[in-house]
Amino acid sequence: MGEPQLVALLRPVRAGNAFEETVERLLQAIKLGVVAPGAKLPPERELAVQLGISRVTLREAIRALQDAGYLDVRRGRYGGAFVVYEPPRPRQEDLRRAVNEMGPSDLADALTFRMAMECGAAQVLAAMELTGEQRGILTRRLADVNDAAPADYRRLDTAFHLSIAELTGSPLLASASADARLRVTDLLNAIPVLGPNIDHAAAQHVAMVEAILRGDPEGARKAVVEHLEGTAALLRAFLA
Amino acid sequence: MGEPQLVALLRPVRAGNAFEETVERLLQAIKLGVVAPGAKLPPERELAVQLGISRVTLREAIRALQDAGYLDVRRGRYGGAFVVYEPPRPRQEDLRRAVNEMGPSDLADALTFRMAMECGAAQVLAAMELTGEQRGILTRRLADVNDAAPADYRRLDTAFHLSIAELTGSPLLASASADARLRVTDLLNAIPVLGPNIDHAAAQHVAMVEAILRGDPEGARKAVVEHLEGTAALLRAFLA
DNA sequence: CATGAATGGACTAATCTCGAACCATTGAAG
DNA sequence: CTTCAATGGTTCGAGATTAGTCCATTCATG
């Protein structure tokens, strides 16, 4: 089998050039709804610093997204790069296309990665002593998803899931979880938001939060597994 | 609280320049023992492709590691970049220095991240149906650690832990796990390899493998938590 | 309606990074 | 002892990326 673990360590140092990576990152922030439609990105000078790239490269990326119709850039005071993207109504062919673009092995990889990350984050959080504020944020995010209008559902669902990793206080974990979510965004966005599915998911979300608040790592793990397997089953159903 | 999740998404696109990232990556492969002392790195032309950088940049990184005494580079056929690094005998002040270099919040971040990753990977693996070959690899790696000479202990311990993520078949998960391990390598390398600790760890390793082979995600999770908390406690003890 | 602060827009010189081609060394095989 | 394949060593021009500087536009405020 040669040198198996070399693969994990001697992997590419960078995914592409700075421009491409920046476009990808911004696009994900938009598609995840982290920057909501109508809201604007931070000023170029700030954003360039946050992304660790030069303003020139950032502007090229913003320009590309503007040309692609995701952003509306306005000059002058109170100007900025405004998100005009609205998540398209899901169609089954979008899902097929998304799956075909990534390939079956990439799909399994992404789902496995997400399962590991979300289980790990949930149980770590459940094992922590949470402050009242942390509990408040978690329950608030839960309520947000469950009260969401269909148009806002995916965005708030993402926010809920990311909150779990974020509340552990570990930036590394939060980053990795966001990364795991990114890998399946296009797939999730292509799944229709249907009543029964949402009710099902809502109950599972509640189970996750209750287990975390009760300090029950095992319960949290099981709830996450059940929830994510439900999503995976939905995907398979739409592909079959 | 502003825009909490922007932090996770609008984080730096790249950690530094290609040269620095490459030096770091190679150094970790050496320190983790993935390329054992006396072994050589892949040929420059191959390695550059694997790392996704140009040969020129790779050579600068190799040159830096050569100057720093980690590599011995020989020309001609059967030449290459040979690892000459030997893990130094751990001293308490090394541990303190390593901790001071990263800072207390980074330490907590790294430990939390590692806990989440390893728990997630172990339970995912436990939930899979394993082939005979996979079972063989896992038990083989376990035996390797438990039979290890003190000088090889850390290297084989790393190999064992990484195997778990690797066996899930998810490259993303394997990469992230390797990353989590990297964050604590310097700390682990600074902990003396003592008999009682090793016996303790060995029993925990066995518990992890048994739970995985028996298809018991919950048991796997608990075994990992116990093991990693033991390591964290050791760290605290040496720092106190 | 004039001002000024906050923003995007544009340019430049320096540096990093790359791909590609070619050179130099080594040592096993014939 | 000649050959030659596998390896590291070197160079060069093109393109990517950066930091810094200055310009242009907008609009709330006075």
Image (cartoon, coloured by chain):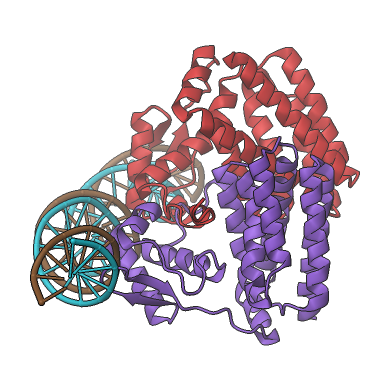
Chain colours: A red, B purple, C cyan, D brown
Residue C26 placement: quadrant: bottom left
- Residue drawn 55% across the image and 68% down it: B33
Q: Is there any visible trace of residue B219 in the rendered image?
A: yes
Quarter of the figure with the C terminus of chain A: top right
- Indicate left or right for B118 with B57 as reference: right
- Residue drawn 72% across the image and 77% down it: B193
| Above or below for B143 versus A157 | below
- Indicate left or right for A136 with B177 as reference: right
Residue B61 x %, y %: 37, 69
Residue B108 x %, y %: 71, 64
- Indicate left or right for B45 with A178 as reference: left
| Above or below for A42 versus B45 | above
Q: Is there any visible trace of residue A35 in the rendered image?
A: no
Residue B206 placement: quadrant: bottom right
| Above or below for B115 versus A163 | below
Residue B139 x %, y %: 71, 53
- Residue drawn 59% across the image and 83% down it: B88
- Residue drawn 61% across the image and 73% down it: B186
Extreme-right residue of the structure: A214
- Indicate left or right for A90 with A45 as reference: right
Could you say which is closer to the camera, residue A177 or residue A139?
A: A177
| Above or below for A94 versus B59 | above
Residue A198 x %, y %: 74, 19
Residue B68 placement: quadrant: bottom left
